[in-house]
Amino acid sequence: MDTMNTYITTPIFYVNAQPHLGHAFTTIVADTYCRYRRLCGDEVILQTGTDEHGDKIVQAAQGAGVSPREYVDRISAMFRQTWPLLEIEPDNFIRTTDPVHIKTVQAILQRVYEQGDIYFSEYSGLYCRGCERFLTEKELVDGKCPDHQQAPEAITEQNYFFRMSKYQQWLIDHINSHPEFITPERYRNEVLSFLREPLEDLCISRPTSRLTWGIPLPFDDRFVTYVWFDALINYLTGIGYPDGENFSRNWAVAEHIIAKDILKPHAIYWPTMLCCLGLAPFRKLHVHGYWNVGETKMSKSLGNVVRPAEMVEAFGADTVRYFLLREMSFGLDSGYSADALLMRQNSDLANDLGNLFSRSLTMVAKFAASRVPAAGTPTEIDRELRDAAVAMIDTYRREMDSFAFNRALAAVWEVISRANKYIVENAPWDLAKDTDKRERLDTVFYYLLETLRLITLTIEPVMPATAVKMRRALGLDAQADLTTQAVWGLLAPQGIITLPEALFPRLDTGKKKKTEPATAAQNTTKIMTAAENPEDENLISFDDFKKIDLRVAEVVAAEKIKKSDRLLKLTVKAPEERTIVAGIAEFYQPEQVVGKQVLIVANLKPTKLMGVASHGMVLAVKDQGSLSLSAVSSQVTPGSKVS
Ligand SMILES: [Zn+2]
């Protein structure tokens, strides 16, 4: 089979700001998709970089009291240093101040000018410095730029224009005949609807009287290039346009990943520029939504900017990657909170995956001398686990191919839950007591280990370090490969298992913000000891217990919380009506809980989850990947005290 190749890009990030969560998400998506394509046997180039010209950079440099050159060097380095912290490994890091990029941009401008697609004209308009472009009357709100809350300046000036309008019909036809050109579909529709109006030509120059920090037009040195015309070309220069084998091999398979705020330049300016150059358009444009922090969009002025380096310090790179990919439905907006991250870490990672892994390996060490046993004749329950694990790979591939990372991971976690249940159902600790049941015990172990092996393949693109740890412990090569290894039964009997340290520490809720990993691990040990040895010093007094207001509540309404697959919003009577957000959506449908009487902690400090205020906590029992709500044995008056 021929090797396929894929060329994946993030935008080059504008260096007027330091790296934040939004940049990190785009780049994690790109890296995950890149690792996934490699896992499928593709040759992949991953490119990112920094966009360094324009008005805003000059202003930011002035603000910092340094020259634009010093300023861009400093911020560009911050981006370059951030990516390895998140286990992102770009093949190319391009800067628009690179001499080779500048040369290519000028060659392209010259060519487009000579073929008559750039012309000189006078233009009067309303210019917003923040946007670095002319705004139309329609875009203004109360006479101001809605993004910058400033009235634009009326400017008349001569400039160069790209004949974008000439390519409008071609672009409409191309989008219509290539349904996957812009995904998800909502953004494709947005672009098509924009294209229903006549497209204006694009102003691609700025007079040097106003701006000198840019690439000079090769045919008129009184002007520099508009920053977008310069920036978009990075996708070509990074792979050696116009000649170079790299370019001819990779351009046709280019896939761009962007956030929705830069849809228009990528979906309209860029393909028309390519068409004008006689180049095929990129293959796909993948567009994602925003991360809201708390109730609002992340912004510098609100002071709610989330820094990737701080997230990694508190939670570790694998957890951050998992959380972001699991939480966001690609294309839609999503909410970020440290609480939600902590919940994923403790529940999905430490409890579900971490426990499955450590319990399985610990039992194999104890009852099978740390060797992979040979499986005996499988029973129905074994075949069911095997079928679920094999089906998981298909679902995973389908969802990863369509950028539904959250659904791909949900499919994996379903099997993790299934495997945790399988342990309980088979109770290996009991089988081990009876020598007649040796074959049965071996079969159970083999099916567990083999399921874990398949799981390592699926999590590699999302949590590379965890996958390697798991594979080493299972006695496998660090190198995962979906084309040859995704078949049931490849784990060789007699292989040696090694017990790893815990994959994920359980983090203490009180320490989430700035927890040092080492401290977190110590806390974990403490919590675990307390749970396992109830008779030790962690006993509480009766007075302590009396502080907890435990009551019976009756669920009168329940609904799913948008964009969360874990949370249900419950309306309960206790006896007053109150809202409680409960992390039970993976185990209960809303209609299953209405009418139930459950136990709640009524005097918990209110907290907000996914924007919904929760007044209290529903008690539930988590057991081996399943969950049961607490209940009373007979119907009582809602609000009755538990004592
Ligand atoms: Zn503006």
Image: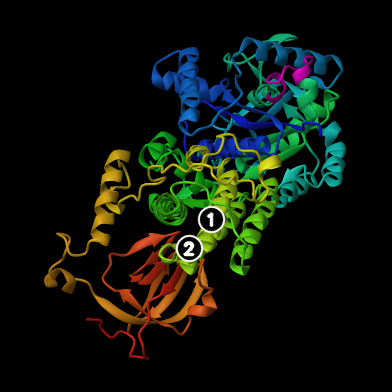
| Residue 333 in view in this figure | no
Instruction: Identify residue for label 2.
Output: 423
- Give above or below for 183 relative to 537: above
Q: Which stretch appears magenta?
A: 235-246
Image quarter hosting the C terminus: bottom left
Q: Position of residue 328 (x, y in %)?
A: 55, 51
* Mark sitting on residue 429: none
Q: Does the numbered disc 1 mark a residue whose Cβ is under 8 Å from ligand 1?
A: no
Q: Position of residue 386 (x, y in %)?
A: 63, 59
Q: Could you give the CA–CA distance between mark 1 and mark 2, rounded to whole angstroms?
A: 8 Å
- Give above or below for 628 relative to 183: below
| Residue 321 in view in this figure | yes
Relative depth, front residue between 404 and 199: 404
Q: Amino acid at mark 1?
A: Leu
Instruction: Identify residue for label 1.
Output: 448
Residue drawn at the location 69% of the way across and 28% of the way down: 124
Ligand 1 picture quarter: top right
Q: Amino acid at mark 2?
A: Ile
Q: Position of residue 222 (x, y in %)?
A: 67, 10
The reply to whether callout 1 and callout 2 are in contact (CB within 8 Å) is yes
Q: Secondary structure at mark 1?
A: helix
Q: Secondary structure at mark 2?
A: helix
Residue drawn at the location 24% of the way across and 52% of the way down: 526
